[in-house]
Image (spheres, rainbow, N blue to C red):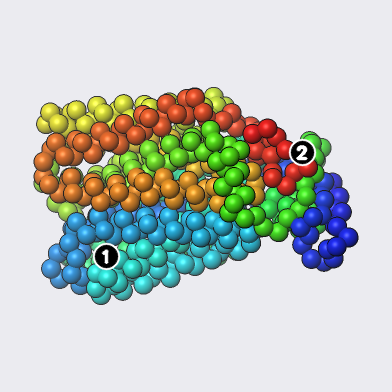
């Protein structure tokens, strides 16, 4: 094993040291691994939760009209669902990201990604038995609270466990899998809204119950996902990190039938138990101001576009094209498919062509295409089908760009601040675009005026283009590089220049 730990004389070796020194090759050993069954286990155990998020958001958007009907069991309007409930869900996600992000950096990835999933499961189950609007709003907030925590804990764990060669495409596809859930949610809502199958006050409850069942399945797989060795060796658990990586190496060698090449460079760090908010803020904004600007731009652009449009697409179809509420799921399934195909087909290019070119081009191209869609919509040139086709093309590129926002903030800041950085940029960007977006967009689409909806389209397009221009100048060349090379850990003996 290539690890040497020297605990300080003032700290017993049995207690995680805060001043001990450790030299290890764990990062390079993880990055040199070929793709294996072990990596698939990580992807399935951690990445599939985005499917649940997509299921949640899409179901609520598509059943909004049914929940507002008499006999649904809830005294609530469609505008409250696409506006207030949507904003509360996103607000919960912002708060959850910040709370669980800090806990994740302090107590480890594994503990927190188990807790966040349990929070999601409990809140979703209680949403299914809603009997009044206040109950529904409360548990939409708490469901978002769990999902927000997932974003921080999961993205940090995935990036730290996946080899650098594959990190970009894997991260994009995992974040893009949200849309697999969206497809399921759209199609499931069609069945749930069919009153010949389920009563008005039963079908929508079963959709939430299905989310609980799927979450329980993910929970069973997730139990086998290990703690991040990168987190372990910084937090005084060097021996555990060495043992874990050694076990993985043996599994991979047995699977591939050949010996792994020797690891590359080592890193020497001063172990620490935790890191304060002051240090995090100083690091992110003082040491990496250009990267902070990049992260905020990417998140604000994609958050407004997605949280506004995905919550309101069904309302657009029913308001302007007289699409029956029970049929909007078919249209949403089509644009969801386009969203998933974007990261799936373009993801590899983020590792080969490079981050800067791909991030900037996907943002700018999706923004320009959305401007075109707004122009066609304003001229009355679109039908429900052609509008859906336009959105499918727009979101093919926008989805890859939006997924790259999560990838970017999870890899361009030091290890000790990773989960909190993800949480911060997610919370601030989503609060700016994800809370105000649904509230503003609900009013604009409910007005029934074409010009109002065109304005919403144009705002989303402008923000995406602006974020793309920022990325063109500030995006970091992270493809194929170790996380420690992109941003040297704060605990490292030798610091980089930022």
Q: Residue at x 81, y 50 (%)?
A: 22
Marks 1 and 2 sit apart, C-alpha to C-alpha, by 56 Å
Judge from the rendering whether residue 155 lies leftward or rightward of residue 307; answer left or right. Answer: right
Q: Nearer the viewer, residue 371 or 170?
A: 371
Judge from the rendering whether residue 357 lies leftward or rightward of residue 264; answer left or right. Answer: left
Q: Residue at x 23, y 46 (%)?
A: 441
Label number found at residue 375: none
Mark 2 secondary-structure assignment:
loop
Label number found at residue 204: 1
Q: Residue at x 33, y 51 (%)?
A: 435
Residue occupied by mark 2: 494
Judge from the rendering whether residue 72 lies leftward or rightward of residue 354; answer left or right. Answer: left
Spot occupied by residue 56 in the image (x, y as percentages of width and height): 36, 57
Quadrant for the C terminus, please: top right
In front: label 1 or label 2: 2
Mark 1 secondary-structure assignment:
helix
Spot occupied by residue 119 in the image (x, y as percentages of width and height): 47, 67
Residue 22, compared with residue 221, is above or below; it is above
Spot occupied by residue 351 in the image (x, y as percentages of width and height): 57, 31
Q: Nearer the viewer, residue 26 or 269?
A: 269
Q: Residue at x 20, y 36 (%)?
A: 455
Is residue 482 shown to the viewer in this render?
Answer: no
Is residue 272 shown to the viewer in this render?
Answer: yes
N-term-proximal mark, 1 vs 2? 1
């Amino acid at each position: 094993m290539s690890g040497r730990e020297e605990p300080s004389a003032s700290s017993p070796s049995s207690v995680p040291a805060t001043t001990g020194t450790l030299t290890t090759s764990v990062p390079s050993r993880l990055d040199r691994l070929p793709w294996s069954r072990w990596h698939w286990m990580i992807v399935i155990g951690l990445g599939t939760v985005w499917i649940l998020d997509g299921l949640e958001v899409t179901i609520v958007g598509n059943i909004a009209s049914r929940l507002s009907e008499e006999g649904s069991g809830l005294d609530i309007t469609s505008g409250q669902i696409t506006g207030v409930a949507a904003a509360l869900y996103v607000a919960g996600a912002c708060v959850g990201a910040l709370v669980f992000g800090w806990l994740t950096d302090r107590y480890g990835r594994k503990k927190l990604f188990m807790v966040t999933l349990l929070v999601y499961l409990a809140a979703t189950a209680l949403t299914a038995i809603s009997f009044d609007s206040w109950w529904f709003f409360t548990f939409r907030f708490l469901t978002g609270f769990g999902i927000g925590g997932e974003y921080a804990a999961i993205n940090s764990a995935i990036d730290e466990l996946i080899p650098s060669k594959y990190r970009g495409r894997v991260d994009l596809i995992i974040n893009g899998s949200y849309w697999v859930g969206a497809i399921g949610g759209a199609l499931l809502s069609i069945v749930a809204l069919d009153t010949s199958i389920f009563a008005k006050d039963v079908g929508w409850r079963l959709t939430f119950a299905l989310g609980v069942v799927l979450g329980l399945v993910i929970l069973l797989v997730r139990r086998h996902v290990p703690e991040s060795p990168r987190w372990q060796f910084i937090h005084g658990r060097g021996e555990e990190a060495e043992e874990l990586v050694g076990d993985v190496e043996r599994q991979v060698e047995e699977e591939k039938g050949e010996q792994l090449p020797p690891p590359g460079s080592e890193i020497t760090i001063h172990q620490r138990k935790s890191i304060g908010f002051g240090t995090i803020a100083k690091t992110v904004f003082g040491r990496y101001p250009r990267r902070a600007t990049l992260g905020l731009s990417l998140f604000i652009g994609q958050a407004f576009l997605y949280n506004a449009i995905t919550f309101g697409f069904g309302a657009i179809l029913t308001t302007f094209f007289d699409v029956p509420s029970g049929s909007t799921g078919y249209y949403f399934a089509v644009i969801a498919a386009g969203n998933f195909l974007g990261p799936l087909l373009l993801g590899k290019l983020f590792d080969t062509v490079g981050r800067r070119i791909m991030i900037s081009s996907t943002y700018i191209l999706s923004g320009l295409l959305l401007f075109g869609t707004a122009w066609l919509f304003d001229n009355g040139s679109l039908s429900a089908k052609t509008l859906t086709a336009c959105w499918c093309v727009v979101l093919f590129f926008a989805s890859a760009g939006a997924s790259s926002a999560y990838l970017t903030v999870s890899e361009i800041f030091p290890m000790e601040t990773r989960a909190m950085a993800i949480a911060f940029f997610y919370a601030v960007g989503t609060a700016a675009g994800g809370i105000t977006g649904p509230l503003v967009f609900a009013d604009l689409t409910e007005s029934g005026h074409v010009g109002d909806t065109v304005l919403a389209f144009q705002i989303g397009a402008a923000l995406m283009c602006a974020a793309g221009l920022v990325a063109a100048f500030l995006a970091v060349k992270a493809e194929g590089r170790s996380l420690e090379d992109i941003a040297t850990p704060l605990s490292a003996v030798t610091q980089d220049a930022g």
